[in-house]
């Protein structure tokens, strides 16, 4: 029974420990290549609820799609391909905006705003995936495979 006391051996977390546990340095690979030197950024974990609020509404009928994985990505690509060009462009911009929102929420150093997030170019996708991974929303994966983990939602399925 818990009477309001700490269990034996337990410690109260300090703000310093909390910050250390929720911050991590990661390499910005594309920028590192362009600058010909390793460049790192500091990311922070973001809340799942905050991330879910960034997402666009699911496509109509998507509740019948496979729950996750490649089959779901194929269903999404087929749905996007079925949209008229203007609607497809709007949806793609909405999806791209999620990447920028993740960067604004999850980049600690340098601080990134929604307005400045697009300056990260192709690193934006890689960094956003790493922020989601660090936040526990994506499975761990080797950094070399990060770029492959970002689906190209503009292309129709093969």
Image: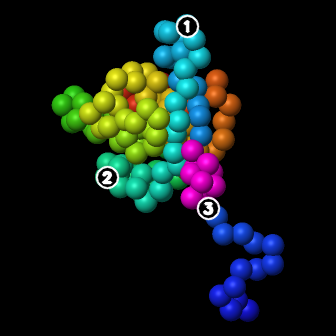
What secondary structure is found at the residue carrying circle 2? loop
Which secondary structure, mark 1?
loop
Question: Label 2 crowding class (10 Å Cα cut-off): few <14, some 14-19, many 20+?
Answer: few
Is residue 30 inside the magenta stretch?
Answer: no
Q: Between residue 151 and residue 33, name the one nearer to us.
A: 33
Near-viewer residue (82 or 99) = 99
Between the residue at mark 2 and the residue at mark 1, the CA separation in whole angstroms equals 40 Å
Left or right side of 25 for 54: left
> Label for residue 57?
2
Which residue is disc 3 drawn over? 14
Q: At 53% from the left edge and 53% from the top edge, which residue is drawn?
A: 67
Q: Main secondary structure of the magenta part?
A: helix
Q: What residue is rendered at 65% in x and 88% in y? A: 4
Residue stretch rendered in magenta on the structure: 14-23
Q: Residues under labels 3 and 2: Cα distance?
A: 38 Å
Q: Residues under labels 3 and 1: Cα distance?
A: 38 Å
Q: Position of residue 28 (x, y in %)?
A: 53, 24
Q: Is residue 40 above or below residue 101?
A: above
């Amino acid at each position: 029974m818990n009477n309001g006391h700490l269990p034996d051996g337990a410690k109260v977390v300090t703000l310093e420990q909390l910050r250390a546990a929720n911050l991590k340095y990661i390499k910005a690979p594309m920028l590192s290549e362009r600058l010909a030197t390793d460049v790192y950024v500091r990311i922070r974990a973001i809340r799942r609820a905050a991330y879910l609020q960034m997402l666009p509404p699911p496509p109509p009928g998507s509740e019948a799609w496979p729950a996750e994985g490649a089959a779901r990505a194929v269903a999404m690509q087929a749905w996007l391909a079925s949209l008229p060009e203007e609607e497809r462009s709007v949806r793609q911009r909405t999806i791209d905006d999620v990447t920028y929102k993740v960067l604004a929420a999850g980049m600690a150093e340098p601080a990134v705003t929604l307005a400045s997030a697009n300056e990260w170019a192709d690193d934006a996708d890689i960094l956003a995936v790493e922020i989601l991974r660090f936040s526990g929303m994506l499975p761990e994966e080797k950094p070399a495979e990060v770029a492959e983990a970002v689906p190209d939602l503009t292309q129709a399925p093969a």
